[in-house]
Image: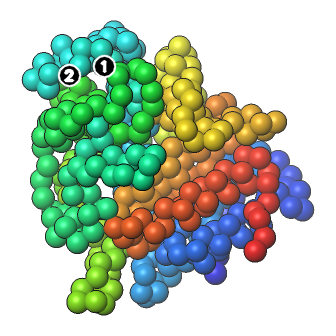
């Protein structure tokens, strides 16, 4: 069953079908595909709308997940880290194309690696959570969620970000710096270390002072090693096999230092919307750096380029949309906005993850369907 916020105040008279029925259907379809619970916030020319479907836990013991519940936002963290790093560029502390090595001499980085390459995933640096190649081969890194039971048993371990970076740098680079594109969480771990070196603060303190506090993001934090998710929140699950039988472990509490600044933040759908609108509206970056952020480099993903901490998706006649969704071991986030900020969509998810990433494809289909419905007015496919 889908629930709707009945307290919206439309900015303009609503048409008989303004796309909300399509959104309800997509949320219900997501639950039917295996997502335990999902919430959505949309703001457009029709006003503000919220919806939710499913349950806050896999046992069905709760109602729908809280509309503004806290979740681990996974790779949506990268947009925050990019904005944080670019704020230092705006202050002249480093230039986008400056080499990062001199700021972090202990890492012995390739002297060609620049901040732009880190933020745009063109550094070639090995992904410390594991590399996946087009031929299907996998080179593992640290025990990430794809390690299954091993990750579950070690989910409270502390990982030093420098150790993660050193592990990645000890492996062969995927390509020469600047010559190709490959998504690597390690790029954002190194960007975190760069922020800390340039500011003399922890990344959590710098994020709080420069972004979270100025924007009034009361539900957002960068925990680094803290294990708890503030209430209210839906529960995150992880499926493992025990003596031939499947078992679901509650992994809502975990130490996110294994992913570090590649995906460790916690937020709410409301805060994500506030952040995106501020980012597009020029509250965080000067116009020139905002344009750099939104200038995409081609990726292997059809119709989607990567800027600096954001995907830029081509919707043809409907223009472009700036996105960065994320998933983190049973929790997930949706973020999408038009470059002019006139239309924005954010959401949260809770689900049961597993080593085989069995919900990765439903997650991708869900995010694509929602983006097409909200930003291109397309109804979801039937059946």
Query: Whole-percent x and y of residue 282?
Result: 54, 24
User: Relative to the observer, which residue lies in front, 305 or 87?
Assistant: 305
User: Relative to the observer, which residue lies in front, 59 or 138?
Assistant: 138
Query: Whole-percent x and y of residue 208?
Result: 30, 37
Give above or below for 135 relative to 26.
above
Q: Are marks 2 and 1 in contact (CB under 8 Å)?
A: yes
* Horizontal arrangement in the rendering, residue 249 relative to residue 313 (left or right): left
The residue at the point 57 percent across, 42 percent down is 301
Q: Secondary structure at mark 2?
A: loop
* Horizontal arrangement in the rendering, residue 141 relative to residue 269 (left or right): left
- Colouring: rainbow
The residue at the point 51 percent across, 28 percent down is 307
Structural crowding at the residue carrying mark 1, measured as other residues with C-alpha within 10 Å and reported as few (<14), some (14–19) or many (≥20): many
Q: CA distance from mark 2 to mark 1?
A: 7 Å
Query: Whole-percent x and y of residue 32?
Result: 60, 78
Q: Is residue 214 visible?
A: no
Query: Whole-percent x and y of residue 316?
Result: 77, 36
Give above or below for 32 relative to 312.
below
The quadrant in which residue 157 appears is bottom left
Residue that numbered label 1 is attached to:
113
User: Relative to the observer, which residue lies in front, 349 or 3?
Assistant: 349
Residue that numbered label 2 is attached to:
109
* Horizontal arrangement in the rendering, residue 268 relative to residue 298 (left or right): left
Q: Quadrant of the N terminus?
A: bottom right
* Horizontal arrangement in the rendering, residue 283 relative to residue 203 (left or right): right
Q: Is residue 332 visible?
A: yes
Give above or below for 246 relative to 347.
below
């Amino acid at each position: 069953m889908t629930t709707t916020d009945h307290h919206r105040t439309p900015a303009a008279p609503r048409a008989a079908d303004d796309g909300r029925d399509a959104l309800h259907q997509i949320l219900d379809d997501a639950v039917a595909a295996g997502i335990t619970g999902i919430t959505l916030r949309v703001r457009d020319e029709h006003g503000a709308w919220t919806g939710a479907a499913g349950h806050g836990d896999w046992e069905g013991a709760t109602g729908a997940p809280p509309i503004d519940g806290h979740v681990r936002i996974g790779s949506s963290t990268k947009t925050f880290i990019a904005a944080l790093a670019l704020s230092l560029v705006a202050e002249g502390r480093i230039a986008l194309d400056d080499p990062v090595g001199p700021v972090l001499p202990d890492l012995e980085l390739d002297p060609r690696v620049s901040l732009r390459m880190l933020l745009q995933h063109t550094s070639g640096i090995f992904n410390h959570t594991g590399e996946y190649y087009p031929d299907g081969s996998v080179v593992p890194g640290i025990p990430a969620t794809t390690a299954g039971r091993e990750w579950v048993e070690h989910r409270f371990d502390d990982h030093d970000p420098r150790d993660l970076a050193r592990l990645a740098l000890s492996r062969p680079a995927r390509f020469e710096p600047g010559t190709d594109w490959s998504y690597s969480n390690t790029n954002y771990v190194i960007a975190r270390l760069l922020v800390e070196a340039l500011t003399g603060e922890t990344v959590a303190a710098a994020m709080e002072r420069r972004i979270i506090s100025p924007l009034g993001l009361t539900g957002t934090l960068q925990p680094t090693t803290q294990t708890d998710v503030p209430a209210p929140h839906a529960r995150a699950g992880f499926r493992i096999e025990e003596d031939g039988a499947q078992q679901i472990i509650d992994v809502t509490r975990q130490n996110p230092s294994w992913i570090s600044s590649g995906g460790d933040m916690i937020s709410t759908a409301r805060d994500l919307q506030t952040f995106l609108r501020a980012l597009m509206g020029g509250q965080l970056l000067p116009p020139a750096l905002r344009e750099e952020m939104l200038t995409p480099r081609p990726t292997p993903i059809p119709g989607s380029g990567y800027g600096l901490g954001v995907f830029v998706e081509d919707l043809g006649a409907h223009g472009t949309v700036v996105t960065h969704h994320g998933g983190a071991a049973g929790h997930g986030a949706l973020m999408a906005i038009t470059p002019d900020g006139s239309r924005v969509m954010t959401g949260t998810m809770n689900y049961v993850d597993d080593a085989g990433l069995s919900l990765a494809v439903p997650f991708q289909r869900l995010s694509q369907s929602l983006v097409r419905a909200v930003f291109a007015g397309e109804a979801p496919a039937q059946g």
